[in-house]
Amino acid sequence: MITAKRPLAQNAKIDSLKKMFLAAEKDTNKVIAGIRLQEAYQSENLDSALHYANTAYGLAEKLGSLKHMCAAQTAIGYCHYLRSDYPLALMYYRRSLEVSEKNKLKKQTGITYNNMGIVFYMMSDYKRALECYQKNKQIKQELKDYGGLASVTGNIGMVFNVLNDNEKAMEYYLQAYSFGKIMGNEKTMASALNNIGTVFFEQEEYEKSLDYYLQALRLREKLDDKTQLANSFINIGGVYGALRQYEKAFEFHSKALQIYEQLQNRRGTALSRINLGTVLYEKKKYASAEAFLKEALSIAVELKLTWLEKEAHDVLVKLYKDMKRPADAIVHIEAANRCKDSISLGEKREEINRREMQVEFAKQQQVDSIRSAEKIRNEQLRHEQEIQKQTFYTYGGIAGFVLMLIIAVVSYRAY
């Protein structure tokens, strides 16, 4: 099991940043130190992370530094995202975006679009997620930021994956892995490997899936990114569950839960509790399973995560049937059906969105192809003009030399 204590390296990093923050004058260096403290604390203590992000924003506002105000607001938004408070996260991201776009702060604009895309993805608004990712991708291409391109390419792949376009998803995941490998970015490589594992999992190729998930886990353990570690643990637990290796499944889901609770990530906590409840149900440990599922259901209802709510109801229905409690089973059957109707409506919208996105994507590819052809034509035209110019200079030089020779001969004969 993972210990709740911070690793010594992380302690040292936070202590070093605190000293830097306290020693810095009230200038942009203090703002940067505050944002770095937010980043260090976001995988340890969200209250502390939010405190330093707000402090950094207040100082940046006093200094009138638009660039640092945007960065601090994005940091505040990210803390709320980690708490699964998506509307509040979007509010801060939009404030940041408004300032960064108005003042042409391209790098910050790209970061904010990417973060907004992640929130829309979590809210199942895949059309808006893809729009944000595409805008970020365009900015990354303009800035020639290949590390950023690797990240956003992987995010686009995730949208296509959830829309059941596995071929397109795999194409983007492989691109993301290649970009990450070229840049030496192990975080991006780990995400790509994890996502490839998910495609194989959905195709029920569990051995291949487990192989990619474990490759991703090894990289994430080196990076000590707790949020991503929890994601790997939950995925590996899911594979072991599908393989009916329940002891291993319980072990990995427990590791994920411990991290999510430590990070105050309520969505992850609910998901882990459902997974643990499901494993305990399969092991016929009904009382423990019921406790985990009820707690998960409470969080899912509060956060309005309908798909998680349905998952909890479905397992509780099976559990109460096995426990010979038909009245309780009926209550959860009715609740599961309400969730199913809501999800079905959402899936219809997703199907419409998917078709619209495919048409828009094809149009964008056509536009990109035309732009690329025009760029090649312009390059060829410039090349031909350069050749003509060089030819003109060459002939001009020859003509000048001949004229000088004639003048020299005439002058010599006259002399």
Image (cartoon, helix red, strand yellow):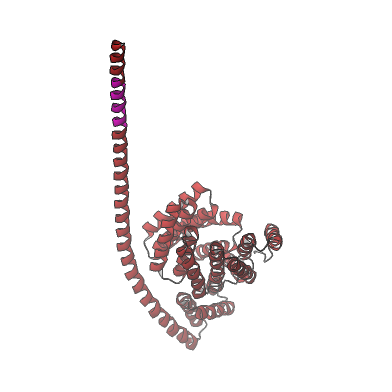
Residue 392, magenta (yes or no): yes
> Relative to residue 125, is residue 155 depicted above or below?
above
Total labels: the figure holds 0
Rendered residue at 51%/55% (across/down) = 188
The quarter in which the N terminus is drawn is bottom right
Extreme-front residue of the structure: 415
- Extent of the magenta region: 390-403
> Relative to residue 382, is residue 324 depicted above or below?
below
Residue 331 visible within the image: yes
Most prominent secondary structure in the magenta stretch? helix
Asked whether 299 or 120 is in front, the reply is: 120
Asked whether 163 or 395 is in front, the reply is: 395
**Residue 396 % position (x, y):** 29, 28
The quarter in which the C terminus is drawn is top left
Residue 404, magenta (yes or no): no
Image quadrant in which you'd find residue 133: bottom left
Asked whether 332 or 23 is in front, the reply is: 23
Left-right relation of 361 to 180? left
> Relative to residue 322, is residue 46 depicted above or below?
above
Image quadrant in which you'd find residue 6: bottom right
**Residue 154 % position (x, y):** 45, 57
Asked whether 379 or 171 is in front, the reply is: 379
**Residue 63 % position (x, y):** 60, 65
Residue 254 visible within the image: no
**Residue 4 % position (x, y):** 67, 66
Left-right relation of 33 to 380? right
Rendered residue at 63%/64% (across/down) = 34
